[in-house]
Image: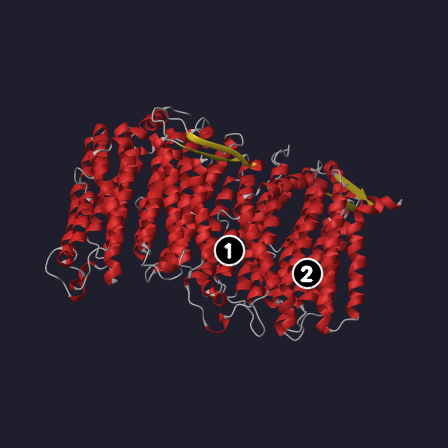
Amino acid sequence: MNWLDYTPVLPEILLLVGACAVMIADLYVKDEGRRTSVVLAQILLGLCALATLFVDAGTRNRLVLFDGHFIVDHLANLLKLVCYLSVSAALVYSRSYLEERRLLRGEFISLLLFSLLGMMVLISAGSFLTVFLGLELMSLCLYALVALNRDSAQSTEAAMKYFVLGALSSGLLLYGISMIYGATGSLQLFEVAQQVMRLSASSADRNLLVFGLVFIVAGLAFKLGVVPFHMWIPDVYHGATTPVTLIISSGPKIAAFAMMIRMLVNALPALAPDWQQMLALLAILSIALGNITAIAQSNLKRMLAYSAIAHMGFMLLGLLSGWVGANGMNRPDAYSASLFYMIIYTIMTVGSFGMLLYLSHAGFDCENLDDMKGLNRRSPWHAMLMMIIMFSLAGIPPTAGFYAKLAVFQAAVAAGHVWLAVAAVLLSLVGAFYYLRVVKLMYFDEPVGETAAVPRRPVGRFVISLNGLFLLILGILPQGLMALCVAAVAAL
Amino acid sequence: MILSLAIWLPIVAGVVVLALGDRSALTRPAALLGAILGFLVTIPLYTGFDVSTSAMQFVEFHHWIARFNINYHLGVDGISVLFVLLNTFITILVVIAGWTVVENKVSQYYASFLIMSGLLNGVFAAMDAVLFYVFFEGTLIPMFIIIGIWGGPNRVYAAVKFFLYTLFGSLLMLIAMLYLYNQAGGSFAIQDWHKVPLALNVQIALFFGFLFAFAVKVPMWPVHTWLPDAHTEAPTGGSVVLAAILLKLGAYGFVRFTLPILPDASRELAWLMVALSLIAIAYIGLVTIVQADMKRLIAYSSVSHMGFCTLGFFIFNIYGVEGSLMQMISHGFISAAMFLCVGVLYDRMHTRQIADYGGVVNTMPKFAAFMMLFAMANSGLPATSGFVGEFMVIMGAMQKSFWIAFVAATTLIWGAAYTLWLYKRVIFGPVANDHVAKLKDLNVREFIVLGLLAITVLWMGVYPKPFTEVMHATVNDLLRHVAQPKL
């Protein structure tokens, strides 16, 4: 093994070293100087992005490293870039919020960076072992992050819930993995794929495999937060401080998506008819429950939590349309639709929580629906941005959210799941109602009480404007990102 | 290039108006300038239009989303060109009509209307289904804002109802479009879909997919219930655009999608469409009579008039289709005029109840004269535009069946009843109260707006040939498509 073999892992190495360096450097700064650490972290993210772009330039189809434990392909690089962006945006949005509440501690930054490392390992995982490694690294950091505000009973309770349920789901996942391992004798995804192809012909082996598959899908569904494994989502979203909610709702979802692609599409394509059925059920239940329950929420963070459940359901519509019959002709189309949905969703969720953070100020958390009242009177610009984000979440053109929905619906219809698409479409009408309500509160109602002041923060304002307008620009010119997504899944 | 200008010029003007803000003295002039330029750039569409062909004209084609083979494909034929012109013309009137009336969030008000005007041009010019859908849905956002911010007391309910009703329809249409996309081998081009063979049961399923979207927009009975609420609560400008243009989107959709793409289902289900149209004409006509709110009354009369449009399309002859199109355009002018008349009164009295008025002719003679003309046009008096379309549709229906024509013709009675009764109660009689006694007659601004509309209404009624000759070739081609089975 020579030096060159390590080049594809450059971003991970860089982040690991950098995160340690930031952690050490942070010991020498006082609370007032913590901004330096944030800036260092941002620079680190920028370097990682450059490294990933460099690696991507040298990636043809797929690089398999370290005895098959680590994969670098276009999909991995694209997802990593989205993760950097979301973490970077999270740092920008949350800095003043955390400063005002004296929560901007060194731990926040280092835990965030280490959980990012976990996401990256997960995204590039080439074997069940690395999947689990990445997953645990990411999750353990997140459990701690949820409890960031340790004096808040709500946060602590949320962290506890997240931890217990997360551990349970990891257990389920491990159990499923052990079944598959028992049947195939391998941990590496591509070897497993070949073995499963051979084994699934006999019904006795197939039963064992499907038994393992059920546990794997359940574990994945937990991590992704889809019905009926969604219980933790609203409580954790609500209980965690808003910056942490933002983080949980973006990067880890991307990682969970990557995990699904790796474990289901890469490792178990021979069982596609089985897991597609399971995903169909998960998808339609999530869309229904997420959208209907969101209507009843008066807390914006809870509402967005249920909306997240529904959106993950929509995303699954693409994943479950990949294999049609025996030939799998629809594959790149369907998976790229899910990937596109995932990326757009990340931009939307970062934007919506970012807006909540932007509108909060010392002594006031913007997190109830009523806090949005009359935003158009207070700040027309931010009201417009939030409106774009909400319409995008609802999937109304000309915003990016529409093309995301169009892509997954097209994948479902092309795969012959017309009724699934019709049901999803009708439930997205239900979803439109609660997004509309936010617009209604901002535009049609008068502002009340304390919420009147909109803080001025130039950097935050610039980034949130970029974030919101990006959804509109992508809504007018979506081709570039779509082409990237198609290229990314072409090599799967 | 002209079509792109027609779409993007108003949108850019809208963004500029938004950027100018509420306090700038330039906001209103900029909006007016944008609207007038928007109208001027569409005039070459009419003067340069070749009436001898049914092919798309002024075509523009650029690749847009290669991933799904979606293209920025614009063009107009003899049907859509008239709606583009109608839309840009009405936009000017709306901008003038709101000049002194709107004081709250002025820039957002004008920006919404200008952006909507551009989007509506896009709907009529789009030759690609996704492009059509994007514009079709995009119009919901500004309209939602317009009703919700500047509307009447019950505006929030009306805005949400409007949005969800229309969204429901469009979403089903989206699935139908995706199905056709896959059937057509990966093409969203509307003209490609004309050639796709489809089994009858598939056609019927798709027909209902499109029907929900368009029926809600038209609106047809029984999904019309959002309209009276939206109209009543919308500000005057909103009601005008809603009645004059937005309602036309539904009927236009039938012509653009349902008839040529699903001809067999259209013929198979024509009975249903005719029945629903007749119910709208006769039953809603009766409902209109008893309304106590002026805007509600005109809103219901819109439903009844739009029934004529859908009726004309589904009797499949040249009189019917051309009559429908004439009716759509004429209704665009007349309903706009009626809502503006109510707006004139509402701005002075701040009430829409008929009972609060009476004897307006004593204080506002000029206004009374204008409203007389529009009321007559609304009830379909010969020599006004309202007569041409209704007469042609009834003539077409007569060729098909005496009884269809008979029921349709009752509109001449109901129409006269509700409009003239409304006119009598508001305008004639003794002066009802002190407020009426203090009314001031039309100012110059209002006079120009109503005057322009009066000229158009009379011109269309006396000499409709400039309108019919434009649509003739396209309508013939459309009827040929409908007659051809594609099972």
Q: Amino acid at mark 1?
A: Met
Question: In this view of the protein, which residue sits in the foreground, A438 or B442?
Answer: B442
Q: Do the residues at discs 2 and 1 belong to one chain?
A: yes
The mark total stands at 2
Label 2 Cα neighbours within 10 Å, binned few <14 / some 14-19 / many ≥20:
many
Question: In this view of the protein, which residue sits in the foreground, A48 or B210?
Answer: A48
Label 1, secondary structure: give it.
helix
Q: Which residue is mark 1?
A: A390
Give the image quarter of residue A27.
bottom right
Q: Which residue is mark 2?
A: A166
Question: CA–CA distance between discs 2 and 1?
Answer: 30 Å
Instruction: Report the chain holding disc 1.
Output: A
Q: Residue furthest left?
A: B430
Instruction: Report the chain holding disc 2.
Output: A
Is residue B214 found left or right of A303 in the rendered image?
A: left
Label 1 Cα neighbours within 10 Å, binned few <14 / some 14-19 / many ≥20:
many
Q: Amino acid at mark 2?
A: Gly
Give the image quarter of residue A411.
top right
Residue B90 seen from this side: yes
Label 2, secondary structure: give it.
helix
First in sequence, mark 2 or 1: give its number: 2
Q: Position of residue B20 (x, y in %)?
A: 45, 56
